[in-house]
Image: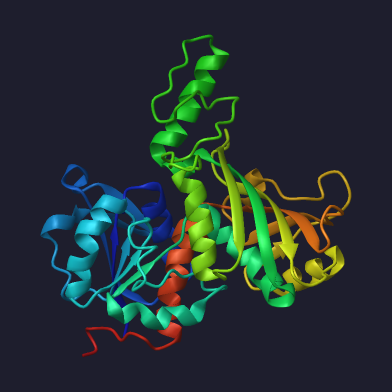
Amino acid sequence: MGFKVAIVGATGNVGREMLNILEERGFPASEVVALASRRSLNTEVSYGDKTLKTKVLDTYDFSDVDICLMSAGGSVSKEWSPKIAAQGCVVIDNSSAWRYDSDVPLIVPEVNPEAIDGFRKRNIIANPNCSTAQLVVALKPLHDAATIKRIVVATYQSVSGAGKEGMDELFQQSRAVFVADPVSAQKFTKRIAFNVIPHIDDFMEDGSTKEEWKVMAETKKMLDPKIKVSCTAVRVPVFIGHSEAVNIEFDKPISADEAREILREAPGCQVVDKLEDGGYITPYESAGEDATFISRIREDITLENGLSMWIVADNLRKGAALNTIQIAELLLERNLIKPKSAA
């Protein structure tokens, strides 16, 4: 007996990727429903060899839906996730709306699968920020081996993290540069084509941005509240794939060779680390891939127990859609939900 699955925000970048991954991974869905806003009513989206027409979120009855994958932004989730959850449907939310609620588990299945058992308090499960998801996949096995004390991370985040409008702006600005047209910035605070912008999300009182705070807060919630985190989040002119330069201070000694061996065996990780030209992964190569790639693993001689590394992943997949589907799979693996149709 399959599960009825609804996707809210099915016409967006992440929503479409969710549909692709559901089909790719053979998720046991008896029915998949694509939902969107009124302005997107009857928009066609692909699910395997099928074409689905979107229905309207605010008139849809979730009483027979088992799982709702929510990817429509924080304000929509704040309003609709509790309503949907109240109808007995488990909501897996991709926005930041519920990540910091103590009654809502924040899950990366390779990192803290046991935390999912607490989802019944609200019937909502949160998906982490895209840059945090890939970071903690790589940090978890190293933390288990040598106990992380502090991390310093600089992110190099692609424009797809800002949605379709971000991708469109990079394309339009790049074209304008080549044909000598005026370049205007609308989605981003400054020109993104052939540039980098050290500013993602709103500024906070301490000078950091909300994106940087998310990395800190989510790493602590999923991995260990004692870890100290410093982050600088940067938008770069890449369409898909987030990269991170990470410096880690450990409590116990750990060598670069030991870290490589640990990460080679860790779930969700793929080590590509050769001391030669091209012996590392770039965001271009990560696009369309499920793994979190780790390269440039080396010892930091300025710290007693320090390592530096380069972490790359497809932000639309592991950073969003894939992780959401993996959470749904985890619910099934742990027998935490049954199809309503079976009842």
Q: Examine the rendering and report whether any part of residue 225 can be seen.
A: yes
Question: Which quarter of the rendering shows the C terminus?
Answer: bottom left
Q: Taking 11 as reference, is 103 above or below it? A: below
Q: Nearer the viewer, residue 79 or 72?
A: 79
Q: Nearer the viewer, residue 132 or 10?
A: 132
Q: Position of residue 140 (x, y in %)?
A: 63, 70
Residue at point 54% right, 41% down?
158
Q: Is residue 154 left or right of residue 249?
A: left
Q: Nearer the viewer, residue 219 or 28?
A: 219
Q: Position of residue 193 (x, y in %)?
A: 55, 25
Q: Is residue 264 left or right of residue 203?
A: right
Residue at point 18% right, 74% down?
86
Q: Is residue 19 left or right of residue 43?
A: right
Q: Position of residue 300 (x, y in %)?
A: 83, 54
Question: Which quarter of the rendering shows the N terminus?
Answer: bottom left
Residue at point 72% right, 59% down?
248
